[in-house]
Image (cartoon, helix red, strand yellow):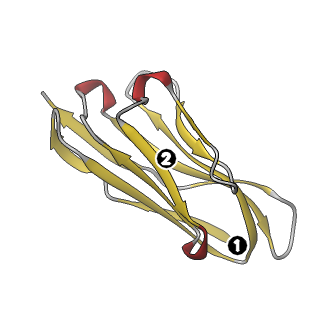
Amino acid sequence: QVQLVESGGGLVQAGGSLRLSCAASGSIFSINAMGWYRQAPGKQRELVASITSGTVTNYADSVKGRFTISRDNAKNTVYLQMNSLKSEDTAVYYCTADVRPNFGLRRGYWGQGTQVTVSS
């Protein structure tokens, strides 16, 4: 069993910053890519940023230069530093990880989501 638990969401004014964290726990052999998605009301879930086990990063065009993804492999944790937040960043943010568990097949796991609300 593998769990992803997010934290760090909340309400912030436009131009402000938030840092999201996502910790993976359970029967984990290794973690490959990790990432963050978001879903705003009435919209499809979209990729925000991803990071490989070798720390190669990828960002959605809408967040480039404002958001930074990083990870701590020793803690099985991925972070999303969000700066210069805009009202359009308001969404539920989901963590995802490509996990090889100690037993069973490698597959993707999702967190429960954390709400980020940016007030204008």
* Badge 1 amino acid: Gln
Q: Based on the displayed image, in which of its 4 quarters is residue 3 positioned?
A: bottom right
Q: How far apart are marks 1 and 2 (CA)?
A: 19 Å
What residue sits right under mark 2 in the picture?
A: 94
The quadrant of the picture occupied by the N terminus is bottom right
Labels 1 and 2 touching (C-beta < 8 A): no
Residue at 45 percent across and 33 percent down: it is 39
Q: Where does the image place residue 117, in percent across and percent down from the top left?
A: 24, 39
Residue at 30 percent across and 24 percent down: it is 88
Q: Where does the image place residue 103, in percent across and percent down from the top left?
A: 85, 74
For the residue pair 79 and 12, the one nearer the viewer reads as 79
Q: Where does the image place residue 70, in percent across and percent down from the top left?
A: 50, 54
Q: Where does the image place residue 42, in percent across and percent down from the top left?
A: 41, 21
Front label number (1 vs 2): 2
Q: Residues within 10 Å of mark 2 (few under 14, many from 20)?
A: many
Q: Based on the displayed image, in which of its 4 quarters is residue 7 positioned?
A: bottom left
Is residue 116 rendered to the left or right of residue 2? left
Is residue 97 rendered to the left or right of residue 66? right
Element type where label 1 sits in the image: loop
Residue at 37 percent across and 27 percent down: it is 41
For the residue pair 42 and 88, the one nearer the viewer reads as 88
Is residue 3 rendered to the left or right of residue 78? right
What residue sits right under mark 1 in the picture?
A: 1
* Badge 2 amino acid: Tyr
Is residue 43 rendered to the left or right of residue 27? left
